[in-house]
Amino acid sequence: QQQKQTKINKQAYDFSCLNGYMQRQFPKMSFSEVDDRMKRLAEKVMASALKEENTKDLMSMFTVPEDCPIGLHQAKEHELLKEIAEEHSAESIKRKKSFKMMRSQSISLQAPGMADWAMSVISPIVPPEKHTDNIPEFQRMTISGDHCAGITVEDYEQAATSLLKALFIREKYSRLAYHRFPRITAKFLRSANNETWNEEDEIIPDILPYVTDGQDPYSMEDIPQNLGYILKMKDGIIHVYDDEEAVTQEKPHGLPYPDMETFTIDMTHVLAMIGDGPTKTYCHKRLNFLMSKFHLHEMLNEMAELKELKSVPHRDFYNVRKVDTHIHAAACMNQKHLLKFIQDTCNAEADRVVMEKNGKKLTLRQVFENLHMDPYDLTVDSLDVHAGRQTFHRFDKFNSKYNPVGASELREIYLKTDNYIHGEYFARLIKEVAQNLEESKYQYAEPRLSIYGRAPDEWDCLSKWFIQQKVYSPNLRWIIQVPRIYDIFRSKKIIPNFAKMLENIFLPLFEATVNPQKHKEMHVFLKYVTGFDSVDDESKHSDHMFTYKSPKPEEWTLDENPPYSYYLFHMYANIMVLNNLRKERGLNTFQLRPHCGEAGSITHLVSAFLSADNISHGLNLKKSPVLQYLYYLGQVPIAMSPLSNNSLFLEYSKSPLREFLHKGLCVSLSTDDPMQFHYTKEALMEEYAIAAQLWKLSTCDVCEIARNSVLQSGLSHQEKKHFLGDNYLEDGPEGNDIRRTNVAQIRMAFRHETHCNELSLLMDAVKRECTAGHAE
């Protein structure tokens, strides 16, 4: 009993440490504090990923039963024996009764009135004065009896405690980096800690609203003054010092500076959960329940939802706001658009000098003559930028599709910002795409531009291109993508170590934040940048296991590429420090929005769960019930691109998007690369149309996806209020203005009540454990 009480107290201590409300310092830990069992489980998952072994038994037994029938049978038999043993245990009977008493306080077992039942679910975290009378009436499902059926009480407690701790960890990293964290989950976490959630404690990213009519988006007036801070890189992270004396005394400015050891400890906890049998079983059962519950809801309430939508004036699927949350600028146009642009420029500007090669200046006409081509004879087939069967699982062939007619010269002329003509053609192409979006009025995009980290002047060049070519559009928000190609730069002796690459990427950002007067163009450009992306082929294998013993970036002089998690931690760490510095100055902040889970190891999704605001792709969540359930509980946004995946990694019919949507994960649709994957002028509408037709999605389904895209986008708080409703930060139907989103209030209430129910199951387990410990 004394050992159990110590365990409970330690768990509560862990939660309170992870909470750290309003604390702007990074709480550090030592690996010596980590439980040995957790270390072993985490090492097992990491080792299996490193050796590229068959990890299905470890991570996805429940998703592919046909591949491992013996293992599945043994697991079920083991669980059955545990349940039978528990039935004869007086202690277990007592604990089950305790659980039933607790659940009866929040969920009635007597089939009460609909609105009463809804309020009983959310009442533990919503104060009485906040209760409203506009909870929609619809057919709800209640489940009576033992909610622990199929899993032992001990396993339930263990799973709930681990899941809650993982959510506390994500909240810690989200708050420190000014990333979003769902309000409803935060309320339950406060309740688990016997604390009260306050609206003042909520953190949302600082993003500047679009420029209103009459304002100059490139204005360099009212630029903040120089702070005079000194910047030094230490262990791959930029440190800020007030003056030279602070540098000498090693006293950095009061900002949170993360360390790699603490990050790997937190990763270890989540990795251990993936390999933990009871947690896998619990998450698998809850995910199956979520899917079945939605199917029942759809069967019972589909017509009621449709009736709601028909009563909304003016609004339908076509005129709700949609954001293309994942699109690359170099492929933001379709192939026909690019072909027409190439032919038009050749007709109008054939004698213009467009590049310099081997000391010789070449006109556009000469470039095509050297390629032995006539622009007039080009077709979309000969342009050869569209992905197809030959690119499936061949990322190298896919990358070559960025070269029109296979010629790198045309890519440099038309799809680059830093070329002989200062990226003019590329800018004109993007502005034509932006004009189409502005004419459609209801579509927005977040194109990615590249910063490679090979030289420190890349930021200045990109900023000058943006301002000189006047690329600003109210329908575009910009994201900076950082390709994971350190190994290429190192092999060519461009950089001496990984720290130099990080310095080239992040030091100019800090300099422009500390002294905007010296970097005026960059200061203006950064107003319209909302986040950072980490891109490259995730299926590329790394022989290095990311641990707290991994070399520091200054020591990483190897020719091989660092692993994905190593990249992500150092990007997150620098963005976190930068965001806190920019917040002090009243400047906009940035989000980390990496490509993740498209292929490769499951550990990518673990590191992103800690560090990312949202992710792109997320296909590999299908392999891990634990991670998938965590992404649901934390409502981590996922930008999915099934047409892109269909040409690269996963057939369209096997895409988990519909499954994720039905379960309640926060998914949106995006195009990725219209030049490679789409045929029409409106690539995003093409993406929605194919998904709706193939999966028979309802109007409410596609409008829910569109609403998710606005929520997870880099649009400002003011724009989201305008597009979604003034109270969009509220939970459930209170946060939905059906006149703007065209999402039925019934659907919003169902999502909210289901999410509350899942969170309350975890909270009840932890509270019961603490109560039982005190009683003993």
Image (cartoon, grey):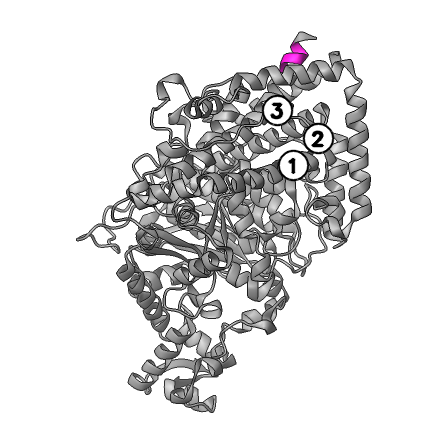
- Mark 1 or mark 2: whose residue is earlier in sequence: 2
Q: Do callouts 1 and 2 mark residues in contact (Cβ within 8 Å)?
A: yes
Give residue 197's position: percent from left, percent from top.
Answer: 44, 23
Residue drawn 76% across the image and 31% down it = 36
Q: Looking at the picture, does residue 191 appear above or below residue 151?
A: above
- Which image quarter is the C terminus in? top right
Alpha-carbon span between mark 3 and mark 2: 29 Å
- Mark 3 or mark 2: whose residue is earlier in sequence: 3
* Secondary structure type for disc 3: helix
Which of discs 3 and 1 lies nearer the camera? The answer is: 1
Question: For the view shown, which residue lies furthest in the top direction?
Answer: 775
Give the residue pinned by disc 2.
150
* Secondary structure type for disc 1: helix
Total marks placed = 3
Give the residue pinned by disc 3.
14
Does residue 588 show up?
no
Q: Is residue 59 left or right of residue 307?
A: right
Residue drawn 47% across the image and 39% down it = 300
Give residue 92's position: percent from left, percent from top.
Answer: 74, 17
Which of discs 3 and 2 lies nearer the camera? The answer is: 2
Q: Residues within 10 Å of mark 3 (few under 14, many from 20)?
A: some
Give residue 122's position: percent from left, percent from top.
Answer: 46, 24
Q: Is residue 307 left or right of residue 155?
A: left
Give residue 362's position: percent from left, percent from top.
Answer: 40, 85
Please name whichever residue, 188 or 165, is drawn nearer the observer in this view of the structure. Answer: 188
* Highlighted range, magenta: 770-774
Q: Amino acid at mark 3?
A: Asp
Give the residue pinned by disc 1.
285
Is residue 720 a member of the stretch shown in magenta?
A: no
Q: Do callouts 3 and 1 mark residues in contact (Cβ within 8 Å)?
A: no
Alpha-carbon span between mark 3 and mark 1: 27 Å
Q: Looking at the picture, does residue 1 appear above or below residue 123?
A: above
